[in-house]
Amino acid sequence: MPGPVAVAQGDVVILRKQHPCGGASWSVTRTGADIGLLCGTCGRRIMLDREEFERRLVRLDRPSEPGAAC
């Protein structure tokens, strides 16, 4: 069984269902036992427990590091 998904503040995630506003991308604002997310469209904040977050997760995008080679 794999361990927990490595997620950090600033990561952008796509969840299984869209937000009612129509937004699909979320920014991670808090990590730990609960994951804090910010809707990329309307700015609404939600909290999901880690188990629920990992079940809904479809894709995880990490922002590129400044100064990193392409």
Image (cartoon, grey):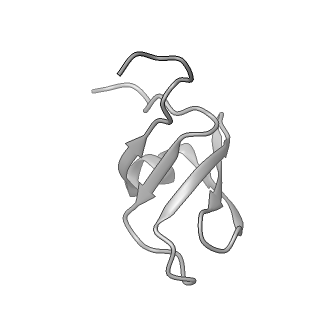
Percent of width and height locating residue 63: 50, 36
Percent of width and height locating residue 54: 43, 46
Left/right of residue 8 with respect to residue 44 in the rendered view:
left
Residue drawn 57% across and 83% down?
21
Relative to 61, residue 43 above or below: below
Left/right of residue 17 with respect to residue 28 in the rendered view:
left
Residue drawn 55% across and 57% down?
26
Relative to 52, residue 20 above or below: below
Percent of width and height locating residue 58: 33, 53
Which quarter of the picture shows residue 1? top left
Relative to 22, residue 48 above or below: above
Percent of width and height locating residue 15: 42, 60
Q: Nearer the viewer, residue 40 or 18?
A: 40
Q: Which quarter of the figure is the C terminus placed in? A: top left
Q: Nearer the viewer, residue 43 or 34?
A: 43
Residue drawn 49% across and 61% down?
25
Give the total of numbered labels.
0
